[in-house]
Image (spheres, helix red, strand yellow):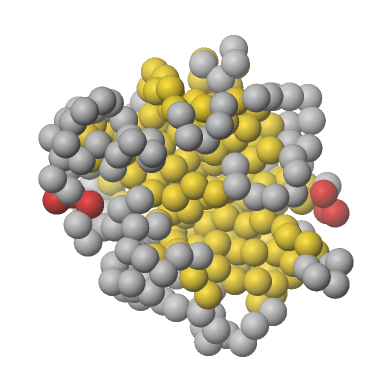
Amino acid sequence: MTEKYRPNLHFSPKAGWMNDPNGLIRVGDLWHLFFQYDPDSTTHGPMHWGHAISTDLLHWSEQPIALFPTELGTCFSGSAIETESAEVKLFYTAHSRTKAGEDYQVQCLVHVEENLSRFSLDAANPVVPNPGLRAFRDPKVIWHGASHSWIMLVTEGQSIGFYGSTDLRNWTHLSKFGEGQGRHSSGPWECPDMVPLTAPDGETAWVLIVGLNPGGYAPGSGTQYFIGQFDGRHFVNANTPETELWLDYGRDYYAAQTFFERGGTNTPMALAWASNWLYAKQAPTKAFRG
């Protein structure tokens, strides 16, 4: 593609608006990138999930749209997992508005078939109903081996909520983290993620990743992280509450997510949106933005 401002290295859709990476997962030899997508606009409209695949994380092939808005709402951010029986599942936030015009968000489960080309909503959706929060979104699901359970991280306003499940349908609220920790701003903590890393002493350290908009290190959107311990229920920050750590110090690294790899190499791979809400809608492109 030769359109002016079209990146040669980073993925961009052929047409339409894109923002947060969603449902990042490696299955076999293929890396799957789902992403926040509006195929009919370049200024952010009703959210769908776009889809692209790669064998090397550099060259991407755009696929048909994966998720469309339903009666539960449009398709906000989420994640993907693969079970021990090789079943792939997606989790996303269905976003709608109340009669008063306020955001209303719930978490939904999607079953994936035929080499990640067919998607069906679970009949029990929403699998995690809204507990009364205006900002309740971006479910990131991971496997926690020590507790033999799935853990879902969800934006709960200025905190991250932790939920647990053994069947991916029935979820129990375990705890939350955020109050008085790191940097806060007028917006919610968004797009959480959490990965284990091996510390120099051989112990496991958990890295909790959180998007902050506005209020990042550079003006506008930013991605902070915390290092600590997670016991299957609670995350405990290893640093002082006022410590601020940033995945990137520039302006164009937001909503970072890691790829789910069953039986992976224990070296997390992350992908972020190369933009900033301060000016994302003003990027001087024509056919696409993001």
Residue 152, image x and y in percent?
A: 62, 50
Q: Quadrant of residue 110?
A: top right
Which residue is at a point 59% across and 71% down the rendered structure image?
A: 226
Which residue is at a point 83% across and 53% down the rendered structure image?
A: 147
Residue 136, image x and y in percent?
A: 44, 55
Q: Nearer the viewer, residue 231 or 62?
A: 62
Which residue is at a point 49% across and 70% down the rendered structure image?
A: 246
Q: Nearer the viewer, residue 10 or 43?
A: 10
Quadrant of the image containing the N terminus: top left
* Above or below 97: residue 65: above
In the picture, measured across the screen, residue 39 lies left or right of residue 104, that is left
In the picture, measured across the screen, residue 33 lies left or right of residue 144, that is left
Q: How many marks?
A: 0
Q: Quadrant of residue 232?
A: bottom right
Quadrant of the image containing the C terminus: top left
On the question of residue 106 being in view, the answer is no
On the question of residue 271 being in view, the answer is yes
Which residue is at a point 28% across and 48% down the rendered structure image?
A: 98
Residue 14, image x and y in percent?
A: 27, 26
User: Residue pushed farthest top?
Assistant: 114
In the picture, measured across the screen, residue 217 lies left or right of residue 237, that is left
* Above or below 119: residue 42: below
Residue 254, image x and y in percent?
A: 40, 56
